[in-house]
Amino acid sequence: MEPEKRHFLGLSRSGFHRVAYREWGARDAPRTAVCVHGLTRNGRDFDALAAALAGAGWRVICPDMVGRGDSDWLGNAADYGYPQYLQDVTALLARLDVTEVDWIGTSMGGLIGMMLAASNGHPVRRMVINDVGPLIPKAALERIAEYVGQSWSFGSLAEAEGHVRRTYGEFGDLTDAQWRKLTEDSLRPGPDGGYLSNYDPQIGAAFVGQPLEDVDLWPVWDRLSCPVLLLRGLRSELLMAGTAREMMRRGPPTELVEIPAAGHAPALLSAFEIETVRDWLTGGTADLQAVPARS
């Protein structure tokens, strides 16, 4: 199964920009899922999950957020932030012409989903949040700042794969084929037959030139009401165990599944991860055997 490549126009202070997305499944499917990636990633991260959901009857939409993948880069680095991302996904939802969606968001994509679902009249039916929460520790932000604003170049695919394995090593216990695909999806052609990272280095502008502090979004979390499946890499330094427990105690009805082989963030490539998401979105209950009960 191959997706259809599409795009729409977003608007920033610099003018219009093209936002690319891939659409899986039938356009008239009874359910639509929107999958939004992490800070330096793109919509190809969801290929395996999207194919599985489309095979189960969903229409699945996987955008490359502006500045990533096949989407345009912004003319003003200061526009890379959640107000712009929310504006773009609102335009995407209007393009889809549906009354409700299931939201699957990894890291940044999870935060976008939280902010969207905290708004009155939102269209989110169910939401899967992959390894992020309303409290983001300063230490995790400092680690992200070490690589997010870098402009990487590589002379060969093997060199690029080594970098990807080091940078995203906490994604989980991936096969060689999965690491190779992840690498290919992380690159764009460079000069002289080499490769460059497939995102605008300016997406990291918010991490540069100012002190980093803990991010507290608990007021956003407390406004949510849609059911949430929270995935957490057991070694995650971004979604701390205590934060996950507090998310289960307050806010929307939340189920937690921890992925033992991952840190930040589970890649959603294993059969267990894909089946967990699919079954929960269908209306079932996630496998909570290793998860502490809500107190």
Image: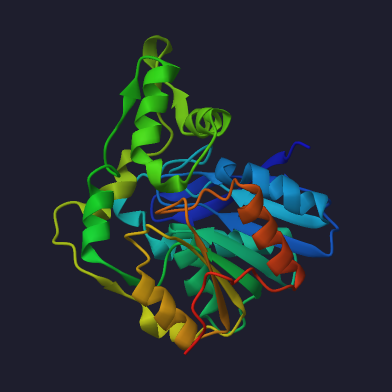
Classify residue 161 by image quadrant: top left
* Residue found at x 47% / y 73%: 115
Asked whether residue 134 is in view, the answer is no
Task: Confirm whether residue 72 shows in the render.
Answer: yes
Question: On the rendered structure, is 39 left or right of 270?
Answer: left
Please say if 152 is above or below 109: above
The quarter of the image holding the N terminus is top right
Rendered residue at 37%/71% (across/down) = 241
Q: Nearer the viewer, residue 101 or 51?
A: 51
Nearest the viewer among 104 and 79 is: 104
Residue 184: x and y in percent read: 51, 28
Counting every numbered tag in the picture gives: 0
**In this picture, residue 271 sits left or right of residue 208:** right
Q: Which color scheme is applied? A: rainbow
Furthest residue toward top? 192
290 or 210: which is nearer to us?
290
* Left-right relation of 72 to 219: right
| 194 lies left or right of 141 | right
Q: Horizontal and vertical percent for residue 129?
A: 52, 66
Residue at 39% from the left image edge and 50% from the top image edge: 14
List x then y, in percent, for residue 262.
Answer: 45, 52
